[in-house]
Amino acid sequence: MRIVFLCTSSLDYPSPRGRWLPLARYLARAGHEPHLLMLHPTFDRLRRRRFVIEGVQCAYVGQMHVYGLPGERRHFSASELAAVSLRGALALALATVRLRPDVIHVAKPQPINGLAGVLAAQSGGALYVDCDDYEAEANRFGSAWQQRVVAWWEDQLPRMARGVSVNTRFLYNRLHRLGIPEQRLRYVPNGVDIERCEPHDARRVRALRAALGLTDNPTAVYLGAISAVAHGVHLLIDAWTLLRERMPSARLVIIGDGDDRPALMTYARMRGLQQTVIWAGRVPAAAAPAWLAVGDCSVDPVDDTPAAAARSPLKIVESMAAGVPVVTGNVGDRRDMLGCEAGLIVSPGDPHALADGIETLLSDPAQRACLARGARAQAERYRWDRLAEIWQTLYEISA
């Protein structure tokens, strides 16, 4: 079966790199022919636009709706955005039609790839949609009309599709309320390649800790997008301000990049955290397990919002696979992801509760060791090979 995924972003972004590519790899192993068609943030500067990753045919076919990687992005004007979006949709549609796919899987129900999927499906191929975010709530918009357009596609595209995959129960229930029958829905949370996420080289982890100036310092790690809106880094800094007074030797390593990084670094400096917060920046995806293992625990700071409930954090499953217990808020599927054995669940949106949870783990080596063993065991539930088997059943739905 030839399967085409339509993505509005590149492998530099979490969802293509951490969700659709791993799924496509397992689809290739199962004998299918997966294609990942993507837009790129600097398409005009790309030298290699087509390549193969473990049986997955990957191609960049046009410009993303923003220019540049997170942390250095330039947003287009309204007129530029309309032109870039239309060109991107047409490029995705034409590339899809040329492939003559059996399945067209729109990766996020957004206007650009949604329009591409609808257009391409007119020439053949069953239309499917993957929902891995609450798009109208989780993204930044330049104006109210842009949000309304995204909200319309997010609600309508799943109704046009033969089947819909979702990564959280929040989205499953939301789409069911919109009228999507349960037999057309598949719950496939974000997963992990266990072997890729194990930090095999203890010497590398020790070298990273030494390079960061960490000796015996109790250390927490945040790995992900640096965002005050969608990923709770503002909440984490507030919690660390409280924790610093109780555990002055503790260190927080923040790994990643994003548009809010300069403002959040300033916010941390204003709270006197220069000596206790380390901004590591962007790291290669392959190095993420070792960076996670630098920490005694990892943190997924979260507010109690619909956007947070709709998210299945890759950082949680990757941390569990690396044997690093997690502290996070009780929102969406997070309690179920951690179970009772892989970390601590605290009240969401509360810096005091988050600080208490982090302190509990950093100050109790025995509990950390127990939770680290539980985290590795819990990660087995989220192996991509198991989740890909559920994903494939979506394509068995008859018209």
Image (tube, rainbow, N blue to C red):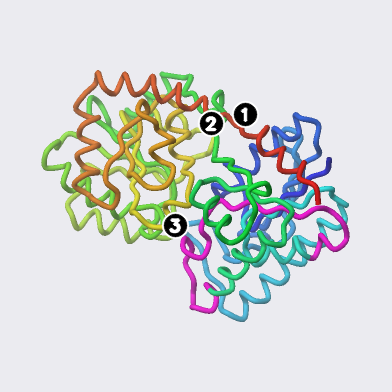
Say left or right for 19 vs 71: right
Residue contact between numbered discs 1 and 2, judged by CB atoms under 8 Å: yes
> Was residue 135 drawn as part of the magenta stretch in this picture?
yes
Say left or right for 201 vs 83: left
First in residue order: circle 2 vs circle 3 = 3
x and y, in percent, of residue 364 in the image? 21, 24
Say left or right for 225 vs 156: left
**Quadrant of res 258:** bottom left
Which residue is labeled 1 in the image? 386
Q: Nearer the viewer, residue 391 or 259?
A: 391
First in residue order: circle 3 vs circle 1 = 3
Please name the residue shown 57% across and 41% down the image: 18
- SS at mark 3? helix
For disc 2, the neighbor class at 10 Å (few under 14, some 14 to 19, many from 20) is: many
x and y, in percent, of residue 315 in the image? 45, 39
Q: Nearer the viewer, residue 355 or 136?
A: 136
Tell me the kind of residue under disc 3: Ala
Magenta-tinted stretch: 119-147
For the residues labelled 2 and 3, the Cα–Cα distance comes to: 22 Å
- What numbered label is drawn on residue 382? 2
x and y, in percent, of residue 362 in the image? 23, 30
Tell me the kind of residue under disc 2: Tyr
**Quadrant of res 188:** top right
Quadrant in which the N terminus is drawn? top right
Which residue is labeled 3 in the image? 307
